[in-house]
Image (cartoon, helix red, strand yellow):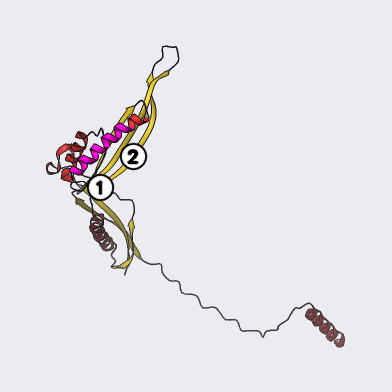
Amino acid sequence: MKRIKELLIVATLAVLLIAGITVVVMPKAESQAAPASAVEDPARTITVVGTGKVSLVPDIAQVNVGAEARADTVSEAKAEVDRQMAAIHAALEEMDIDEKDIQTSHYSIHYERDPMQVMKEGSTGEGPGGYRVSNLLRVTVRDVEKAGDVVDAAVEAGANQVYGVTFTVADESSWQGQAREKAFSDAEARAAELADQAGVELGAVQSVSEVIGTWPMAMAPTPETIMSGGFSPGELDLSTRVQVTFNIQ
């Protein structure tokens, strides 16, 4: 009987070897309990958003001036507009506007008809039409006190289109730096107040990011900023926001 068992074991091992299966007998190891991994506490932080504002008097004005004419033919309308634009360019040159500060912002040619009611029940017709040509220039005036005079000169030269008078500042990086500095100081003050209320001590800065989407806003004009031509540059309330995360000690 013992012999038969030994033969069965040998036969089984032979089958396993033929099938490519390796049997490894490992000594029984003593069971050991795995050490529990230490769980770290989540970072303790305070996150705030600070705002920084800078009020500045604009030092640049931008105006759109130009000419528009209508005639029976394109060539007639264009010739009239070209004559007016040449006079406008000459007037701007006399006002010491640099050529690089004069840019075409709009140019169009289109045919239009005059609407006219036709004496028929339930119908509407169109009368004779013409071609309309329009040419607009975006003019940057680097002395805001001259903005009104520049527009007056353009109108006297033949400009019959004036659009979009805006005021801004030339050196945006300067005010942005001031606004960011004030925003960060505001964030520090807010975080310190929160830490004091929570009874904790404020630590080092962990992260800083600027909040995108803040824009300059025009403030009400003062009597000193009202210029000729009825323009009032007023002040620009320029602002930015930063989000700062501080560690808690």
Q: Residue at x 28, y 43 (%)?
A: 138
Instruction: Judge whether residue 186 is colored magenta.
Output: no
Q: Nearer the viewer, residue 62 or 210?
A: 62
The image quarter in which residue 108 lies: top left
Q: Report which residue position mark 1 lands on.
A: 99
Tell me which secondary structure the magenta stretch mostly adopts.
helix
The amino acid sitting under disc 1 is: Glu
Q: Is residue 44 above or below residue 222?
A: below
Name the element at disc 2.
strand
Residue at the bottom extreme?
3
Residue 49's x, y, as percent? Answer: 30, 57
Tell me which label, 2 or 1, sits earlier in the chain: 1
Please identify the quadrant where the C terminus is shown. Answer: bottom left
Residue at the left extreme?
224
The image quarter in which residue 28 lies: bottom right
Is residue 162 visible in the rendered image? The answer is no
Name the element at disc 1.
helix
Range of magenta residues: 78-101
Q: Nearer the viewer, residue 104 or 28?
A: 104
Q: Report which residue position mark 2 lands on.
A: 106
Residue 44's x, y, as percent? Answer: 36, 66
The amino acid sitting under disc 2 is: His
In screen coordinates, is 156 left or right of 80? left
Residue 67's x, y, as percent? Answer: 28, 34
Q: Is residue 226 above or below residue 80?
A: below
The image quarter in which residue 131 lies: top left
Q: Residue at x 78, y 81 (%)?
A: 17
